[in-house]
Amino acid sequence: MSKIHIPTPLRQYVGKQATVEVSAATVAEAMDALVAKHPDVRRHLYTDEGKLRAFVNLYVNDEDIRYLQKEATAVSEGDSISIVPSIAGGAAGTGDCETADLKPATTMRRCTCCPA
Amino acid sequence: MASTITEIPVTLSKDEILRYSRHLIMPEVGMEGQQKLKAARVLCIGAGGLGSPLALYLAAAGVGTLGIVDFDVVDYTNLQRQIIHSTADVGRKKLDSAADKLKGINPFLNLRTFDTRLSSDNALQLFRDFDIVADGTDNFPTRYLVNDACVLTGKPNVYGSIFRFEGQASVFATKDGPCYRCLYPEPPPPGLVPSCAEGGVLGILPGLVGVMQATEAIKLILGIGEPLVGRLLLIDALGMKFRELKLRKNPDCPVCGTHPTITKLIDYNEFCGIRGEEKPVANGVPEIQVEELKRRLDAKDDVFVLDVREPHEYQICNIGGHLIPLNDLPKRVSELDSSREIVVHCKMGGRSAKAVAFLQQAGFKKVHNLAGGINAWAERVDPTVPKY
């Protein structure tokens, strides 16, 4: 089994767990297993075309998979996979989500932070 | 690691020697180190959650010149985490409030305040006068701007970022180290941006991360220890777990790679997909003002109020609306009667606009968005309703 570390903003989509255990031989298989178990987390990690979002990085142990074999990177028993989305907070809340574009295509799409 | 500071001969007065005594007796700092601190010039971007502890500790530690860039005014919602400001400062410029506290802590501080929004027009000029830049901003366009300006001017970027219970810290844009774009080449599209008033943040978290940034800045100045260059520190305040990931300098990085394509500052709002002319709420969604809703409710018109916030927000305050959180709306839409007039509200009007658009697509004809949300109601109709 490999362990996937879930960042706090995404835990609400995986039953509030900090880690999810999956059985997989590659990062792609591990992520497929995660999304199969917890379908709600999919759109926060993947685009509608099924590509990993550009602001979500994946690590096997402490290595960025972009510098390994990307999603084909092998994982073995005991490895940990980390999902690391970019976050920007620091000063005052800006209400960006409230002013974000509301075009029909993005209607109902939520950001990784907002309760809704 | 070599110090990033050009050695400037400075001496410490008798008062300063007493003040910095606990530094001076440590061989890793000593007189030489304290003089380096005094000669150092650190620019803090933002006097908010991260900037508060950062600036307070750097001033206390004896950093000689501290610059702060901020254009904001202190409000009540800042006080939960922005500890450089106090209740009496609400309504004052953050720069003025911060200056009082910093000067109070250390009268030897040479404080330089810049009452402006950091922009592509002023960043390079500002950064040139400093040795280290500490990024305490709260949005993606400014993060990329700070990063690129640091790379272009050759200044280390002491980075910290927070969200809810999660923090990140690193040191970017040192001579051989990676930059923020090596880590995240692209920002999230707007609407998926995890930086917002409604996302929330645990008040102590910027304290934790801001102090880490201060620590890294001081190590860079002193040239001691192992700075977070090429390492991303992840902080999970809920589990109180700290993990570290390797960061690599991306040879194809558009700004710090071997063949950079970004050689001057760009339009960062455009880069982050934020188009100024696109105002919220409008976007074709029919609206109703809070005064009009009040009048119609008082007149006992048949208006169904739908609240699309989360249950924990409903507990803070409500105007008696029927609660269906936005995310549950698709599966609970059958609870609504499309023949009735529906007014949808949230906190500020963003989520409810999405709900209105969704309901319109689902065939609802008489549905309006409450402009400004419950906060506007609290402001203009019923002051007993708390704002949050």
Image: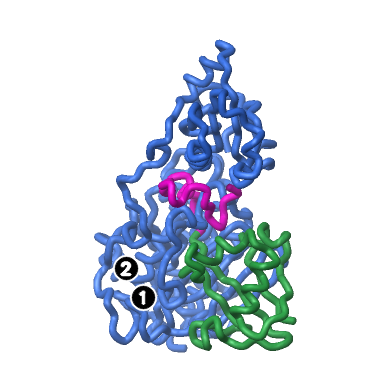
Chain colours: A green, B blue
Q: Is residue B6 visible?
A: no
- Depth order, front residue of B73/A45: A45
Range of the magenta residues?
A89-116
Badges 1 and 2: C-beta atoms under 8 Å apart?
yes
Q: Chain of mark 2?
A: B
Q: Residue B239 appears at what percent x and percent y?
A: 72, 66
Residue that appears at 36% across and 57% down: B273
- Residue tagged by mark 1? B155
Answer with mark 1 or mark 2, whichever residue precedes in sequence.
2
- Depth order, front residue of B296/B86: B296
- Depth order, front residue of A42/A81: A42
- Label 2 Cα crowd, 10 Å radius (few <14 / some 14-19 / many 20+): many
Q: Is residue B140 above or below residue A61?
A: above
Question: Label for residue B127?
Answer: 2
Q: In the current view of this chain or complex, which residue is farthest to the top?
A: B299
Q: Secondary structure at mark 1?
A: loop
Residue that appears at 46% across and 57% down: B138
Give the Cα separation between the discs numbered 1 and 2.
8 Å
What amino acid is at disc 2? Phe
Q: Quadrant of residue B386?
A: top right
Q: Is residue A53 above or below residue B6?
A: above
Q: Chain of mark 1?
A: B
Magenta stretch encompasses residue A90: yes
What amino acid is at disc 1? Lys
Side (left or right) of B313 relative to B174: right
Side (left or right) of B172 relative to B334: left
Residue that appears at 52% across and 57% down: B194
Residue that appears at 47% across and 45% down: A98
